Amino acid sequence: MQTSDLLERCYPGRRAELKRSILSQALACFNAQGIEATTIEMIRAACQTSVGAIYHHFGNKEGLVAALFFTALDDQATLREGYLAQAKTTQEGVYALVHSYVDWVDSQPDWARFQFHARFAVTKGPLKDELVARNKARNRQLMEWLAEPGRGAELLRVPAELMPSLIIGQAESYCRAWLSGRVLSSPKRYREVLAEAAWRSLGSD
């Protein structure tokens, strides 16, 4: 249900029905078999379509992996922007970033698990430049938010390229452990602790 809800948000309408079906089944195959072991034929059989339809929409397996990865990023970004829009202070902004990240992983574990596994493949694949551009745009959005009057003065000493790691790094580490089964408690249980840890890691009281 979580997978279909996310795909409906990112690819709405009846015309995108086949694309949603391919992406949904591809996600399931990649998570079950691993990205390397999954073939286009496996995905074709799972969604009961033709190889031609898959290639028409996504080009090849690398394009399908990237499409899933970027879909996850887009959905994450939508949630993050909504949370950040409600923040009025720098601290609230940092908390919003951590809360949105944790809440997205908690609500979309299959997508988050795939995202962690696929990141390396996308960074080395034909769409690596698009990933770099998206990451730069995301970081730029954060810096623009902090640059608005009344915000961000506490963080001026923190290098811009380091800031995302300081804010999200601890939450990401715990989310990875949860998704792999190394810890049992949902990251949402610790969202306040993780947000406070992020705020303190920036040298703030």
Image (cartoon, rainbow, N blue to C red):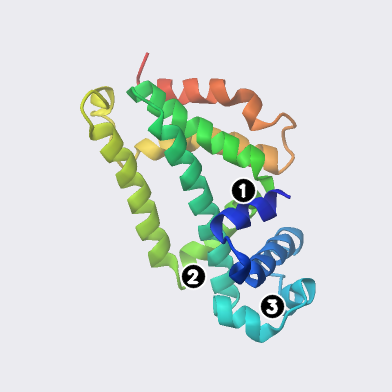
Task: Kindly tell me whether residue 195 is visible in this rendering.
Answer: yes
Q: What secondary structure is marked by label 3?
A: helix
Could you give the CA–CA distance between mark 2 and mark 3, rounded to whole angstroms?
17 Å
User: Where residue 136 sits in the image (x, y, percent)?
Assistant: 33, 52
The residue carrying mark 1 is 112
Could you give the CA–CA distance between mark 1 and mark 2, rounded to whole angstroms?
19 Å
Residue in the picture at 73% in, 60% down:
28
User: Where residue 139 sits in the image (x, y, percent)?
Assistant: 34, 45
Disc number for residue 125? 2
User: Where residue 57 sits in the image (x, y, percent)?
Assistant: 57, 77
Residue 183 lies in quadrant: top right
Q: What secondary structure is marked by label 1?
A: helix
Give the crowd class for mark 3: few <14, some 14-19, many >=20 residues within 10 Å.
some
Q: Nearer the viewer, mark 2 or mark 3?
A: 3
Closer to the chain start, of discs 1 and 3, is 3
Please indicate whether residue 198 sits to the left or right of residue 176 in the image: left
The residue carrying mark 3 is 40
**In the depicted structure, whether residue 22 falls above or below residue 189:** below
**Amino acid type, label 2:** Gly
Task: Kindly tell me whether residue 201 is visible in this rendering.
Answer: no
Q: Residue furthest bottom?
A: 52
Give the crowd class for mark 2: few <14, some 14-19, many >=20 residues within 10 Å.
some
**In the depicted structure, whether residue 170 falls above or below residue 31:** above
Closer to the chain start, of discs 2 and 3, is 3
Q: Nearer the viewer, residue 162 or 87?
A: 87
Please indicate whether residue 29 sits to the left or right of residue 60 in the image: right
Could you give the CA–CA distance between mark 1 and mark 3, rounded to whole angstroms?
22 Å
**Amino acid type, label 3:** Ile
